[in-house]
Image: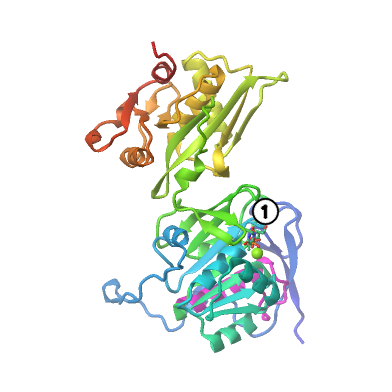
Amino acid sequence: MAKSKSVYVCQNCGVESSKWVGKCPSCGEWNTFVEQVISKSPHPKSSLAHEFSERQTPQKLSEIIPRKEGRISSNIQELDRILGGGIVPGSMILIGGEPGIGKSTLSLQMALRLNHLKSLYVSGEESPQQIKMRADRLKLSNEGCFILSETSLESIFNHIVNIKPDIIIIDSIQTLFSEHLESTAGTVSQIRETAARLLKFAKESGTPVFLIGHITKEGNLAGPKVLEHIVDTVLQFEGDQHHMYRILRTTKNRFGSTSELGIFEMSDKGLREVSNPSEVLITQTDEQLSGTTVASTINGARPLLIEIQALVSSAAYGTPQRSSTGLNIRRLAMLLAVLEKRAGFRLGQKDVFLNIAGGIKVDDPATDLSVIASVLSSNLDLTIDKSICFAGEVGLTGEIRPVNRIEQRISEADKLGFKKIYISRFNSKGIDTSKFNIEIIKVGKVEELFRSLFKKN
Ligand code: TYD
Ligand code: MG
């Protein structure tokens, strides 16, 4: 009998070593090596090159016949939009997110809404009874939706052959295991093997496969990076559990644009789509408060108006605090330095807190102008009218720089009934102002913004 051999595999990056090491030489992570026995079974080593090498010969691009069938609608508009217009047949989509964020809810909701198709929802985490309870909460039912509580890949494939589903959901990839490998479920080799075989199945049969993936405490998708490489689309489900809104973001998409956002609200009947996010992200009160302004941002293809709140107060302790939710803290520090140096505001001894309403994160530089206006407003305790919004980047010299797709930003603000928008002076060329009702105010420097906002006389 052949002697069984074992290797040590880094659970973070998948590097193999013949002996245990404390620190991975490849990714630098500590304590990630796990012993794995190499199976002696005649199962071919699953490498992607191997899986696809059979039956395929090189073809001229011009001779390849595109698949006729178009995209499949998930019947969840927000999901369709971030996928680039629906589910592409044969594609593999990975949904990642923290526990309890709503990955299982979203996928079950999709499976139940696809009532013209046969769907197979495989759960390695919940029993069919638990899934039934969830479906009852969602108040949805679908005769074509099959539930399977199973973790063995081989047995799942047997059921797939019998049921012939049009769409498959695996909840989650970390619970699957292949009987060909001796390592436990959730290890790098199991994730790699099961995902590669599901991918092969998806490509050959044209059946879209959704994989649900856990994320690590650092916020990365658990498992090897290779998982993100082999799937076609990676969707990240974000949002604090305590916030009402959940944001679905594409971080990779072979069939559409990335950085699209889909916004959902968790209700007692599952996830509800939020189709007019700008309206919900802005506090609807008549009260005027200092430190609150609205920025016209762009996320993916969609303009989004968000509320930025700042609170500036005298530092309670020796070292002033800077805290930011939803916006990069370094960006905030840079903007405060610009205000201090270029506009002469003494913020060095002040605590500054910044918050983007609704728990969303933005990295659009066009929020700079709004951040500055919020900080100034809170510092002076002077309110800025709620009908004003901002779109501009601030440079290190205090200049207001142009931002992309300005017309779209203006038009969104106009549509939502804002009366004035501040933009960069250098952004105004070629804008057809006649088609907007909103007043466009052009500023070139931070001082100009300050004068225009607060020095009325
Ligand atoms: P779930 O989909 O189980 O999260 P994940 O699969 O990402 O771990 O989401 C569970 C959370 O959603 C849980 O905290 C309860 C909440 N929830 C509702 O508020 N309303 C509902 O109708 C459902 C089904 C879940
Ligand atoms: Mg779940």
Farthest-out residue, front: 286
**Amino acid on which the number 1 mark rests in the picture:** Pro
Residue, x 42% and y 35% (percent of image)?
366
* Colour setup of the view: rainbow
Q: Is residue 41 above or below residue 429?
A: below
In which quadrant is the C terminus drawn?
Answer: top left
Q: Is residue 346 visible?
A: yes
x, y percent for residue 173: 62, 69
Residue 218 is covered by the magenta coloring: no
Quadrant of the snapshot with the N terminus:
bottom right
Within the magenta stretch, is there residue 200? yes
Horizontally, residue 82 falls left or right of residue 68, namely right
Q: Is 108 in front, or is 270?
A: 270
Q: Is residue 45 above or below residue 373?
A: below
Q: Position of residue 204 (x, y in %)?
A: 46, 80
For the residue pair 9 and 118, the one nearer the viewer reads as 118
What is the span of residues highlighted in magenta in the rendered image? 177-203
Q: Quadrant of residue 97?
A: bottom right
Which residue is labeled 1 in the image?
A: 25
Identify the residue at horizontal 59%, vertical 55% (top origin). Answer: 266
Name the quadrant containing residue 401: top left
Find numbered disc 1 in the image and state the secondary structure of the residue it sits on.
loop
Q: Position of residue 190 (x, y in %)?
A: 66, 71
Determine crowd level at label 1: few under 14, some 14-19, many 20+ residues with C-alpha closer than 10 A.
Answer: few
Q: Is mark 1 within 8 Å of ligand 1?
A: no
Q: Outermost residue toward the bottom?
A: 162
Specify whether residue 223 is in view.
no
Looking at the picture, how far across and down is residue 124, in whole percent?
A: 68, 73
Nearer-the-camera pick, 191 or 85: 85
Q: Residue at x 56, y 63 (%)?
A: 106
